[in-house]
Image (tube, grey):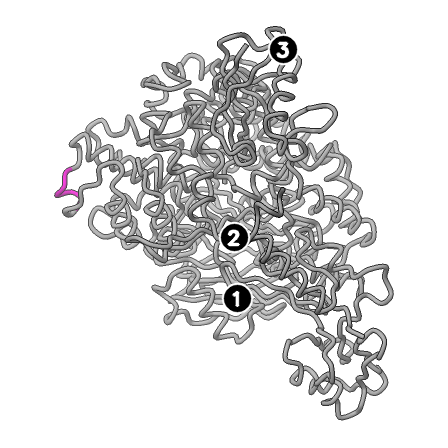
Amino acid sequence: MRLPVELFGLARRLGGEKEVIVEVSDEATLRDVVVALTRRFPAFLGPLVVPDTYELEEPYFFNYDGRRVAKSLKERPQEGDRLLLFLVDAGG
Amino acid sequence: MPYQYIICDPDKCTGCQECELACSVTKHGMFNPLLSRIRNVRIEPVVMLSVACKLCEDPPCVISCPRKALSQDPETGIILVDEDLCDGCGWCIEACDFGAILLNPATKRVEICDLCADEDEPQCVKFCSKEALYLATPEVVAQRARRDAVTKLLQELVAS
Amino acid sequence: MFAYTGRILHVELTNQTTRIQRVDEDFLKKYVGGVSLAARLAYDNTPKGAGPLGPENALCFATSAFGGTIVPVGNKYGVAAKSPLTGFLGDCLSTSYFAAVIKRAGYDGIVIKGKAEKPTYIFIDDDVVQFKDAAHLWGMETFQTEEAIRGEMGDELVRSCTIGPAGEKLVLFANITNDRGRQAGRCGLGAVMGSKLLKAIAIRGSNPVQVADPDRLCAMALELGQSAQGTKTEKYRTLGTVANVLSLNRMGVLPTRNFQEGVFEAAEKVSGEYMHEHYTDKAVACAGCPIACEQVVSVKDGMYKGARTSVDYESLFALGTSCGLDYFPGIIKAIELCDRLGMDTMSCGVTISWAMECFERGILTKEDFDGLEPYFGNHQAEAALIEKISRREGIGDLLAQGVKRASEKVGQGSEHFAMHVKGLEFAGYDVRGLQTFALGAAVGTRGPCHNRSLAYEADTHGEVDRFSAGPEKGKIAKEKEEFAALLDTLMLCKFIRGCFKDLYEEAAQLYTLTTGIEMTAEELKQVAERCWNLKKAFNIREGWTKDDDWLPPRFLEDPIPAGTSKGYVVKPEDLRVMIDAYYKARGWTLEGLIPKEKLIALGLEDLAPEIGV
């Protein structure tokens, strides 16, 4: 399936794009999405994505369409989901 | 032989002044910028730089001392202070172009950066979280500047 | 005593006298520092019913164990007094070198009472306190004053906190500024200083600060400093807090045009990313900070060429998106003006947003605005209004009183969209789509403060469903408050919290290594709970009732019109349930009052007779 992923903050800076489409299998987990993203943007590895585990470095996380935060990378996105690679933190 | 001394990169320095605290705690066991041999200057809002002894050739401080209390170690270039001869007159402080000498108000003797001769490495460099401080000879400083300039100019070629 | 000095300086401006109050380690261990210590000093030194702009209101500064040491992000100070905006406790924190010099001059806190006969500034030179004439400084801007004093003293190590013209004019949201760009911003403490004819407090501190275990403390500090370079603080270091703009916009909770909407069509043009690309000069640090989050920006061309200041998310929303500004230089100019004139950008921005909505609805006319036409997005009118407010000129006199009083005076339905709680203007989060913060904002002791509450984190990080409002939120809001209180008391910058694996444990260790006073994680938790109850006790003494814990009508009645959070509103019955659950979680009565046993259990037994039920 093809999933749109919106990029924010460091992800946007490293990727140079606001939004990308990733191609993953229909049974893919969010971790597979991360893997796909790092293949597309190798610069993610390290600052944004932990090598080997492909966990997202804090404070980045996945959010579904701005409505719901993903609890873990084991979750399976559905066709039609819109993902945000996201961060929110204390104002100042 | 060129001397190594503490250099501060103004692009990286954020003016946090932790270097001052690292120095004073290393040399005096307590935190007080007035007892630090490296001092940070902040000209608000963006100009920030730390300054320590530059290990001059023909150091004006050594030349100026009326009691010959200061001397320069020929190997390391560090300025040595003979505490028995120094009487805290402060003439060397006036002679130094960089304000790199401090007069300890309690002991009335001057103190000058000795690159943490008693430690593994200069502590200010160790504690600078932005890696703005580093130990280098003038040649290394020039090399860095050249490399930065060339990298900026020819970014794409360097990256590939 | 290590790290602490055990001395509180009391200054009486009326007859220009000073005295030292000695405090022991038991007292200091109980209140630790910062907001907690400042609140205790305020409680003890401001009599019940004191006028906030009167001589009896004590302005209380408190530093912390970490001030002046190598502990990263530890150079902060708390200030507290009765707030002229809310009539309740106004507790602020600010940061950088001023905090360190209070300690090095020999004090853990400074309490200022009375009123000077004429414009005065205090110069604290270690243990010598001088009262100096400030006639030549009166009327000067904030940083200008700081530099003038430094010039007079001939010593750049003299640090000052100052008020600007706004504080002199008693603008109710005037702030206290120090070290050029740092402010004790909210609650109108600048007006408290102004009411005392106190233009500045200048301090030279030449004493060293000694800690119990310098070697181990330095090792911990080094580790913390290094972990603060990682991704956990990346957001602060490279973009600053303004990275929030696009995130909140995407969630549909970015306050737009006085909180009418949650999505701003021009969000990209006022985003952190845009700012970084076009306006950011450098990120600089406070004293002792390895993160360096202060984004100094400047305008290089156009009508606001030369405007230069630091931009944070809250200032950006209040003077930017909430006023409908899509022109970034206009926002930079507005923030710079507030900083120079000495006013809280948040309260100022939200008050101007209200005024703009009044104009667009025809409740206030061009004549009322002395010829200005402040429709949303009109950055020139905004800049003009900021200047008028600082001088209390024309409509500035009305707006200088804050949005609560202004809307009460103007009426005509404008109270519906006066976005404040208890008189303090809102922070940059639309609570209709962040319902845990809806609770946190309603019950916060100084008002709807994101900083004291941190409840929005539960919403934005998906710890809970941000759209639902249930009793489970009560406990969450309490825990978040206490986490915030802990950092505000130890005086560690919140931005470093992601660098700790177990904040309570590690903070307790840092504290013990610094002070030599044994502190456990459990005891620190108690300190945080004590702090919150102390602040609440102050409010109760000043007449707080549970009716004061509520939300502005807009949030309760107007659903968000568009975006990811479309359709949501905070239902009054839900808010009631959440607030009741919160009081219960806190161990308070249904009326939100504190039982005697609770005060005694927290070591606040001296408050029990007057406050406890």
| Chain of the residue on which disc 3 is drawn | A
- Mark 3 and mark 1 on one chain: no
Q: Tell me residue B62's x, y (percent).
A: 76, 86
> Label 1: which residue?
C17
Disc number placed over residue A28 in the picture, else none: 3
Distance from disc 1 to disc 2, alpha carbons, whole Å, reads 43 Å
Dot 3: element: loop
Q: Nearer the viewer, mark 3 or mark 1?
A: 3
- Residue C368 is one of the magenta-drawn residues: yes
Q: Are marks 3 and 1 in contact (CB under 8 Å)?
A: no
Q: Confirm whether residue B80 shows in the render.
A: yes
Instruction: Give above or below for C32 relative to C193.
Output: above
> Label 2: which residue?
C282
Q: Nearer the viewer, mark 3 or mark 2?
A: 3
Q: Tell me residue B35's x, y (percent).
A: 72, 69
Question: Looking at the image, is mark 1 or mark 2 earlier in the sequence?
Answer: 1
| Residue at the image point whose x is 72% and y is 28% from the top | A51
Residue C101 sits in which quadrant?
Answer: bottom right
| Residue at the image point whose x is 36% and y is 43% from the top | C328
Dot 2: element: strand
In this view, the residue farthest toward the bottom is B66
Distance from disc 3 to disc 2, alpha carbons, whole Å, reads 42 Å
Q: Confirm whether residue C99 shows in the render.
A: no
| Residue at the image point whose x is 71% and y is 73% from the top | B53
Of A22 and C420, the residue lying toward us: A22
Dot 1: element: strand
| Chain of the residue on which disc 1 is drawn | C
